Amino acid sequence: MSALLSWLPSWSVTFGAGGAALLGLLLLGYALLPFARMPTLAAAGGILCLGAACYLAGVGSAQAVCEAEALRQRLAGIERDLAVARLERDIANAAYEDATRRAAVLDETLQVNRNRIDDYEAELAKRPPDRRCDLTADDLRGVRGGP
């Protein structure tokens, strides 16, 4: 019987316990009436219904405890996943900020190198056409990255 009841949610078992208790009280009340037919049978049915109500109330209470523990474990798992997701978000934000900073440094370095190249091209353009391919000591320093 409890295997069958375990498929039901605890609220429905508790609701059934309330119905059985109400039916048991009604049968016992009927058995006490002076014009009742078969009062012994009604009293026995009332007692059986009250017993079933007690059993169902116990099963419903046990199921409610199990369901609450299962929900607590599920909530703990979700909170763990949320903590991991927050940590991953913080790591991703830090990586994004670091990449943004590095990109800014690279852009600045690229602009400095472009300016050096433009200055060197301007200097080469100033030389006479037949001497533009000759490398001077200043040219070699510029190629090596010197001032």
Image (tube, grey):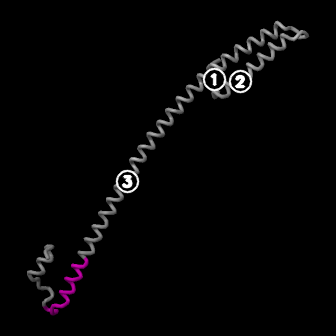
Asked whether disc 1 touches disc 2, contact meaning CB atoms under 8 Å apart, the reply is yes
**Disc 2: CA contacts within 10 A as few (<14), some (14-19) or many (>=20):** some
Element at label 3 = helix
Q: Earlier in the sequence, mark 3 or mark 1?
A: 1
Query: Is 64 on the left or on the right of 52, as rendered?
Result: left
Alpha carbons under labels 3 and 1: distance apart? 47 Å
Specify the segment rendered in magenta: 114-130
Element at label 1 = helix
Element at label 2 = helix
Q: Residue at x 80, y 13 (%)?
A: 28
Q: Quadrant of residue 56?
A: top right
Q: Residue at x 11, y 78 (%)?
A: 140
Q: Position of residue 96 (x, y in %)?
A: 36, 58
The majority secondary structure of the magenta stretch comes to helix
Q: Residue 40: which disc? A: none
Query: Is 12 on the left or on the right of 112, as rendered?
Result: right
Q: Is residue 116 magenta?
A: yes
Alpha carbons under labels 2 and 3: distance apart? 53 Å
Q: Position of residue 102 (x, y in %)?
A: 29, 63
Q: Is residue 76 above or below residue 129?
A: above
Q: Position of residue 61 (x, y in %)?
A: 61, 23
Q: Is residue 122 magenta?
A: yes
Q: Earlier in the sequence, mark 1 or mark 2?
A: 2
Alpha carbons under labels 1 and 2: distance apart? 9 Å
Residue type of the residue flagged with mark 3: Ala
**Disc 3: CA contacts within 10 A as few (<14), some (14-19) or many (>=20):** few
Quarter of the image that includes the N terminus: top right
Most extreme residue toward the right is: 35
Q: Residue at x 77, y 16 (%)?
A: 25
Q: Residue 92: which disc? A: 3
Residue under numbered circle 2: 16
